[in-house]
Image: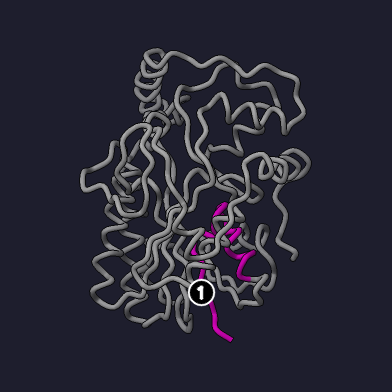
């Protein structure tokens, strides 16, 4: 039986990819920084290798004997006191994965990129054809742009890579990064008095995983696929969540953009002194102000990918967030 390596398996996307692979009866190996965390979150029948994508030796050990690689691991935060970590992990780690995959001659290299690498104006719908050639506005986005380009360059060296581009992922599974899952919990607790201006596109985590595996099974080398269900402005997005929670509350008002920008600038200045994340990272605000709409028609047509509607996805997500912590996969 072929062995499939998954990096980033203790994150929301990687966790669900492990689930999708196991449903197909696949033998899964995971590269994890913490064996304790990996064994707590992931099923016992996974093969665990301790290491890190910034450590090429550990990648070589993890990838030895693997036919397929899912490179999901990355650093998704929107603020760090030392921003060089974005380059180290997202670019350097991806280059390490590329180098070892070429050396090992893997059959498939499934790369989790991001919608941030595409070009579009506010309100514009975009597809996979519009790669942005200009540097984006945040350390995270720029690091993902460079990492994506490294994978493109490796195609010419024989890397059998396929690119997946999820939008704002939510759903059952572990996550250490703020996002829609965190927003659900804060709305439930009454901790969201106001909303940030803007909005963002969303996609259910299990659907993202299924899209990755379908791409491995069906896509041609070099293909790109956006995985996104729908775009929501913040009031509409929060309305769906409040309805899913069964809360008879009014949607909180939206803060004026100029106030939010001021809070963000001052907050990041204090964050640099206190070494604590700011209340509103500039990167988060930047992403929410983009307000462009990704089109997943290609994935739906080519792969037979079917995204879950946001209300249905929220209904499946809420019990896992409010009733219990993430459990091991059991299916």
Q: Where is residue 217 shown, x and y percent of the image?
A: 51, 74
Helix, strand or loop at label 1? It is: helix
* Residue 113 seen in the figure: yes
Relative height, residue 111 to residue 236 (above, below): below
Q: Quadrant of residue 280?
A: top left
Q: Where is residue 149 shown, x and y percent of the image?
A: 26, 58
Position of the N terminus by quadrant: bottom right
Q: Quadrant of residue 40?
A: bottom right
Residue found 54% across the figure and 46% down from its top: 229
The single residue placed furthest to the left in the displayed view is: 134
The residue segment tinted magenta is 1-21
- In the rendered view, does 285 fall on the left or right side of 317? left
Residue found 60% across the figure and 74% down from its top: 47
Q: Where is residue 18 shown, x and y percent of the image?
A: 60, 65
Q: Where is residue 219 shown, x and y percent of the image?
A: 44, 70
* Residue designated by label 1: 217
Whether the magenta-drawn stretch holds residue 317 is answered as: no
Residue found 52% across the figure and 41% down from its top: 230
Task: Depth check: give the residue in front, 66 or 129.
Answer: 129
Relative height, residue 277 to residue 168 (above, below): above
- In the rendered view, does 237 fall on the left or right side of 79? right
Q: Quick one: label 1, few (<14), some, or many (20+) residues within 10 Å? A: few
Residue found 60% across the figure and 21% down from its top: 192
* Residue 50 seen in the figure: no
């Amino acid at each position: 039986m072929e062995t499939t390596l998954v990096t980033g398996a203790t994150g929301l996307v990687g966790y669900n990819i492990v689930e999708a692979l196991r449903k197909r009866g696949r033998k899964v190996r995971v590269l994890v920084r913490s064996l304790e965390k990996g064994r707590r979150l992931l099923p016992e029948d996974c093969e665990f290798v301790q290491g890190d994508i910034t450590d090429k030796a550990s990648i070589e050990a993890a990838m030895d004997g693997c036919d397929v690689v899912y490179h999901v691991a990355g650093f998704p935060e929107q603020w760090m006191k030392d921003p060089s970590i974005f380059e180290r992990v997202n670019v350097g780690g991806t280059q390490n994965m590329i180098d070892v995959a070429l050396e090992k001659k893997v059959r498939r290299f499934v790369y989790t990129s991001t919608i941030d690498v595409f070009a579009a104006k506010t309100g514009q719908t975009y597809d996979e054809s519009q790669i942005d050639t200009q540097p984006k506005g945040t350390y995270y986005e720029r690091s993902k742009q460079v990492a994506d380009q490294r994978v493109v360059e490796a195609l010419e060296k024989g890397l059998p890579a396929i690119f997946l581009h999820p939008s704002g992922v939510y759903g059952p599974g572990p996550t250490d990064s703020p996002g829609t899952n965190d927003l659900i919990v804060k709305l439930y607790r009454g901790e969201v008095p106001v909303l940030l201006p803007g909005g963002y596109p969303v996609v259910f985590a299990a659907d993202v995983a299924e899209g990755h595996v379908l791409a491995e099974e069906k896509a041609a080398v070099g293909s790109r696929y956006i995985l996104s269900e729908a775009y929501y402005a913040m009031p509409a997005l929060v309305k769906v969540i409040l309805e899913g929670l069964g809360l008879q509350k009014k949607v909180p008002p939206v803060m004026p953009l100029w106030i939010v920008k001021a809070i963000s600038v001052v907050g990041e200045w204090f964050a640099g002194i206190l070494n604590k994340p700011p209340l509103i990272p500039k990167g988060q605000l930047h992403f929410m102000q983009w307000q462009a709409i990704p089109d997943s028609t290609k994935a739906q047509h080519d792969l037979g990918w079917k995204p879950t509607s946001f209300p249905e996805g929220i209904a499946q997500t809420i019990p896992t967030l409010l009733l219990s912590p993430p459990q091991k996969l059991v299916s």
